[in-house]
Amino acid sequence: MCGIIGAVSQRNITKILLNGLLHLEYRGYDSAGLAVVDEHSHINRIRCLGKVQKLVDAANRENLIGVVGLAHTRWATHGIPSEINAHPHISEYIIVVHNGVIENHDQIRKKLISYGYSFSSETDTEVIAHLLNMKQKQYGGSLLQAVLKSIPEISGSFGMVVMDSRKSSTIIAVRIGNPLVIGCGMGENFVASDQLALLSIANSFIHLEEGDIAEISCNKIAIFNVMGDIVNRNKVKLNIHHDHISKGIYKHYMQKEIYEQPIAIKNTLLGRCTNKEIDLSELGINIGMFLKKVKHIQIIACGTSYNSGMVSRYWFESLANIPCDVEIASEFRYRKLQVRKDSLLIALSQSGETADTLAALRLSKKLNYIGSLAICNVLYSSIVRESDLYLITKSGIEIGVASTKTFSTQLTVLLMLVIKLGSLNGMHIEVQRKIIKAIQMLPYRIEQVLTKDKIIEKIASDFFDKNHALFLGRGDHYPIAMEGALKLKEISYIHAEAYAAGELKHGPLALVDNNMPVIVIAPNNQLLKKLKCNIEEVRTRGGLLYIFTDQNVEFRKNDDYNMKIIQLPYVEDVIAPIFYTIPLQLLSYYVALIKSRDIDQPRNLAKSVTVE
Ligand code: M6R
């Protein structure tokens, strides 16, 4: 989604802004722009359709200089991706960059037109620039006053940063619905929608809270609420270094992140999983008593996080004996809900900023849940801050738009929670120990399955000319089939669907012919016999079978032209869903590679989906 960076300094900040935008590229965007103001209040703006590098080249050609400025990567919502619609938007001396959606932009636009304003773009953002301009003219006063007067007239969600070129020592940041973080420097300050944009220039940060308005100058940061009253916010230091965000020896971030899974899981387990028990005391001293009360789990999430919730449902119900429901957050938030007694709401999100999940979490606060727990990869994210409890997945930063290590670490945390709840719910101590032993093996098991990389790369070439694919799984591997299909469609643009294998003959079987790849997740478990029947159904219709299975499982006539068997090392049943995800991630990666896709930034997608 859109990315923002702003800077106020006494040195030329053009390079800082461009560098910041390069670090925001991973979020997904279609155009970029920058405006800087020099010491003579002169505004220099450049915008372009496409990659930030084009903007960098243009800025170098024009030798842009400015001590204060704003830059933006745009992910189109209102108005097509184009140079004219790219931010920043300007109304005389007012400059605006904005993330989010202004819901009443039509109404405001009509009013502004009646006052004589004219529009050069199709965006909702341009109305903010003109509205601020109008307020300043109507009431005089500072830009801050104009912002305070404008906010009540704007509905929707907006993280925005604005400035007045005539007073080029201050920028104003507003957080309503979309996150912003201030990066504090020496004699200069910055603001961005994502702290990754600020890592090379600041090491202490202020995370704005909902409704905060910050007036930022070189030596002063003042934060107000929407009423204009001063509020205090903490400054925090972050321990993230630049080398964490480089590709290292890998071609793509996604590839690097797939390979980081053993260490990401080790870090996630550290301090929480001992040989004997799961220790979640980070949730507070009374957590045992609290969890004992939980009689139902309601999970809300989107995309890959939803798929991990779906896997955990099988675990909660079969291992911890606790009923669990999982719902897509955008559905949950718009229907009449019947809340079960003593239900704990779990919000799953790698970014912690997904608009629908955040809105569903906020809605849950008004309902009768006994509490909310976030499982998230970003410590200071909105979902973490607004949940009663949180468990952080320790994946490290994930840059590739396709979630990989955040999925496997979410599952790792969920499985620990299952054991914890199970132990309070009468799970036999031997069963607990057995699962704990399996979880401890997980990093090693993933290292083992990663050695199949070359085999999977070879198979990927079969998909070069394919337009469709089916993924099949049963039990807790059905959501893994869903995740496999999501990964494939997302980065290779091959249309892929997942089915519970038993559903095949209820419709999707009609799609199967000798041009349809059918990927089957077939671990060596109690459902294998049933799955083998489904495999036969595909085989007799000529479908191209790709079976991911255990090395000890035998299939009839392995050398069939239409059946490829990818033998994987042994894995314990309970952790098999996490393990079987890895070859599917690799498959998508290599298919996207041979199709020359933009793997880390697939078209139309964003890392952090901050609009509903
Ligand atoms: O940040 P979240 O986990 O809340 O994001 C939800 C989805 O947008 C996300 O999982 C998306 O489906 C993945 N990036 C796909 O790989």
Image (tube, helix red, strand yellow):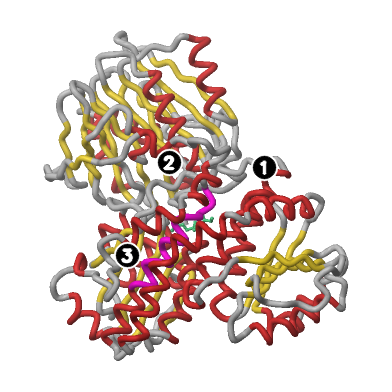
Q: Residue 539 location in percent, x, y?
A: 83, 75
Query: Can you give x and y, in whole percent of width and height, for residue 330 in the image?
Result: 47, 66
Q: Which residue is mark 2?
A: 111
Residue at the location (23% across, 45% down)? 212
Q: Name the residue nearer the viewer: 211 or 106.
A: 211
- Circles 1 and 2, Cβ within 8 Å, touching? The answer is no
Q: What span is colored magenta in the figure?
A: 401-416
Residue that carries the numbered disc 1 in the rendered image = 597
The magenta stretch spans residue 404: yes
> Which SS class for mark 2?
helix
Magenta stretch contains residue 354: no
**Front: mark 2 or 3:** 3
User: Which secondary structure class fits the magenta region best?
Assistant: helix
Res 339 quadrant in image: bottom left
Q: Mark 3 near ligand 1 (CB under 8 Å)? A: no
Find out whether the residues at labels 2 and 3 contact each other: C-beta distance under 8 Å: no
Q: Amino acid at mark 2?
A: Lys
Q: Is mark 2 within 8 Å of ligand 1?
A: no
**Disc 1: CA contacts within 10 A as few (<14), some (14-19) or many (>=20):** some
Q: Are marks 1 and 3 in contact (CB under 8 Å)?
A: no
Nearer the observer: mark 1 or 2; the answer is 1
Choose between 258 and 541: the one closer to the eye: 258
Does residue 88 sit above or below 370 in this rendering? Answer: above
Q: Which residue is mark 3?
A: 374
User: Which residue corresponds to the image point at 22% horizontal and 31% vertical from the top-left?
Assistant: 184
Left or right of 302, for residue 372? left
Q: Residue 54 got which mark?
A: none
